[in-house]
């Protein structure tokens, strides 16, 4: 009887170890991180699909930066909540209310991952969203339509919501200086790693297959430091 109990205990421990062996990754992003069939929810606006209508050579999820990263490290995908054209704050292109798709609206829907990559601020820069002031508490509804308050609100929420989760922000190179400076300042405030993404190959304003690999390479180089 004791022998059977020892065998069952060993089996349970091995099962637990197997279940915990692969870390999971979630993504909170914009069009740079989308791909058809991988979005949660599946109603999110896409840029990358299996049909190359977007004038890029990325036509398979295996070519995306996040798929490459996850596969190379033996991780698994938890949730990819990316939405094409989305801003971090609630102000979208043309000054319209984009609170239905903003990062701060979607940040609570990332599952229970071990690692989170936030790839954003590009549309805030391109759409000329209001920059606002640095503010780290007591945000009003109106202030969340401005970039700096919304960025701080997002990281404050995420670092408390996703406890003991590694969180990294991917920051594109060709953004306005005040956006880049704001991201770095706020990431530093909340202890979130900020990865500068530079000199990537683009097609139609978005990463090509080569560009996706360059993003993956730069993430890996940052994590090695």
Image (cartoon, rainbow, N blue to C red):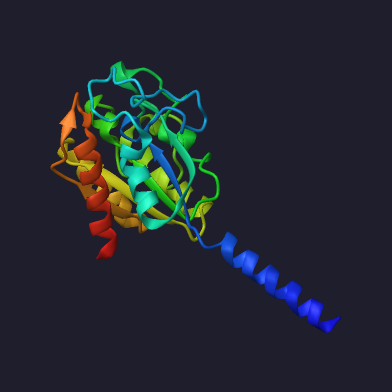
Counting labels gives 0
- State whether residue 39 is above or below residue 19: above
- Name the residue: 17% across, 32% down: 202
Q: Position of residue 8 (x, y in %)?
A: 75, 72
**Quadrant the N terminus occupies:** bottom right
Q: Position of residue 54 (x, y in %)?
A: 27, 20
Q: Nearer the viewer, residue 98 or 71?
A: 71
Residue 149 appears anywhere in the view: no
Q: Is residue 66 left or right of residue 181?
A: right
- State whether residue 169 is above or below residue 129: below
- Name the residue: 48% across, 33% down: 105
User: For residue 85, what is the image quadrant?
Assistant: top left
- Name the residue: 13% across, 42% down: 199
Q: Is residue 145 left or right of residue 111?
A: left
Q: Position of residue 75 (x, y in %)?
A: 44, 54
Q: Nearer the viewer, residue 114 or 137?
A: 114
């Amino acid at each position: 009887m004791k022998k059977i109990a020892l065998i069952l205990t060993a089996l349970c421990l091995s099962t637990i170890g197997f279940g915990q062996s692969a870390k999971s990754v979630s993504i909170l992003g914009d069009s740079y991180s989308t791909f058809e069939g991988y979005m949660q929810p599946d109603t999110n606006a896409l840029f990358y699909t299996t049909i190359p209508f977007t004038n890029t050579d990325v036509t398979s999820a295996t070519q995306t930066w996040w798929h490459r990263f996850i596969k190379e490290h033996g991780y698994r995908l938890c949730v990819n909540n990316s939405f094409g054209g989305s801003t971090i704050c609630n102000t979208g292109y043309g000054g319209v209310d984009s609170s239905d798709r903003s990062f701060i609206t979607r940040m609570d829907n990332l599952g229970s991952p071990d690692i989170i990559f936030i790839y954003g601020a590009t549309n805030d820069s391109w759409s000329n969203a209001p920059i606002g002031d640095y503010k780290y508490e007591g945000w009003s509804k109106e202030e969340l339509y401005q970039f700096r308050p919304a960025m701080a609100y997002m990281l404050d929420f995420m670092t408390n919501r996703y406890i003991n989760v590694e969180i990294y922000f991917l920051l594109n190179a060709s953004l306005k200086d005040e956006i880049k400076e704001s991201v770095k300042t706020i990431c530093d405030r909340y202890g979130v790693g900020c990865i500068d993404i530079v000199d990537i190959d683009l097609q139609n304003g978005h990463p090509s297959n080569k560009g996706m690999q360059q993003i993956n390479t730069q993430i890996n180089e940052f994590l090695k430091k």
